[in-house]
Image (cartoon, rainbow, N blue to C red):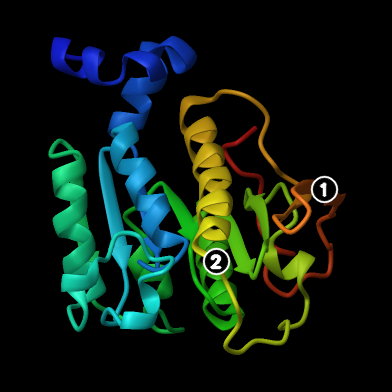
């Protein structure tokens, strides 16, 4: 049962999701891949929502050029490990949330192990090599994956339920071109907010998820659009995946 203090803290959320929904949020464990532009607002909103355990994996240090968008990190954090900066801020946002951090680069050898103890995976990466590894790990572990990506004023979101919906490889069979790209912090905030709305809906069993749809946010003209996507029966990543608990 929720304590009086927790009922007061999450009062507005409980009005929407119910006490059962808030308890499911309290009991959930979420893995966030990356503590950068998408990972920062994602972690902040999950901590504020009362997620039971947040695990963040990042191996990088804070750079001056990160500060326009990676809002967990402040001027005094330059040269610190991002995971240390993130853990310190999140503990102050909500001391009830357990924060675990992992200083490792996600690769083929550790991806499945890193996400294995979590109920959900948040893709807050900046490259598709790591995203494809998360996609495979999600399928292997039967864990939903919440994808987000940003570029300039534009961002995209989709939710992957292994065994039921199109996976990331179904949607993007080949690596999109990558490199250093322009970005404003607000784009990260919009996209991460949509991702975290998906996460909270999934956990609380509320609303309709963005499955088999790729959503696009265009901040340059303040529009949203979407395209339907389908599971590829020949997909190298998910063709053998079974049906997920989402049913």
Q: Residues within 10 Å of mark 2 (few under 14, many from 20)?
A: some
Q: Residue at x 83, y 63 (%)?
A: 232
Residue 66 position in % (x across, y down): 38, 76
> Is 72 positioned to the left or the right of 41 in the image?
left
Q: Disc 2 to disc 1, how far (Cα)? A: 20 Å
Q: Which mark is residue 225?
A: 1
Q: Which mark is residue 58?
A: none
Above or below, comparing residue 169 to residue 244 in the picture: below
Picture quarter with the C terminus:
top right
Badge 2 vs badge 1, beta-carbon distance below 8 Å:
no
Q: Nearer the viewer, residue 21 or 161?
A: 21
Q: Residue at x 32, y 81 (%)?
A: 64
**SS for dot 2:** loop
> Is 165 positioned to the left or the right of 48 in the image?
right
**Residue mark closest to the camera, 2 vs 1:** 2
**Residue 56 position by quadrant:** bottom left
**SS for dot 1:** strand
Residue behind mark 2: 184
Residue 102 seen in render: no
**Residue 7 position by quadrant:** top left
Q: Residue at x 56, y 72 (%)?
A: 131
């Amino acid at each position: 049962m929720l304590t009086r203090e927790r009922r007061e803290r999450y009062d507005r959320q409980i009005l929407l999701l119910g006490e059962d929904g808030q308890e499911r949020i309290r009991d959930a464990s979420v893995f966030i891949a990356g503590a950068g532009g998408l990972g920062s607002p994602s972690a902040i909103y999950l901590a504020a929502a009362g997620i039971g355990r947040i695990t963040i994996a990042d191996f990088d240090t804070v750079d001056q050029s990160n500060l326009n968008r990676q809002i967990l990190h402040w001027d005094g954090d330059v040269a610190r490990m991002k995971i240390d900066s993130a853990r310190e801020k999140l503990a102050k946002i909500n001391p009830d949330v357990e924060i675990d951090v992992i200083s490792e680069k996600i690769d083929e050898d550790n991806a499945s192990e890193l996400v294995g103890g979590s109920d959900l995976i948040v893709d807050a990466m900046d490259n598709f090599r790591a995203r494809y590894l998360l996609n495979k790990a999600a399928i292997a572990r039967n864990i939903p994956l919440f994808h987000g990506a940003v570029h300039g004023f534009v961002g995209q979101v989709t939710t992957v339920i292994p065994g039921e919906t199109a996976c990331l490889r179904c949607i993007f069979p080949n690596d999109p071109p990558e490199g250093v790209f322009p970005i404003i912090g607000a784009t990260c905030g919009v996209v991460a907010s949509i991702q975290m709305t998906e996460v909270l809906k999934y956990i609380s069993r509320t609303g309709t998820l963005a499955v088999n749809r790729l959503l696009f946010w265009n901040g340059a003209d303040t529009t949203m659009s979407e395209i339907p996507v389908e599971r590829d029966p020949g997909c190298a990543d998910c063709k053998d995946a079974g049906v997920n608990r989402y049913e």
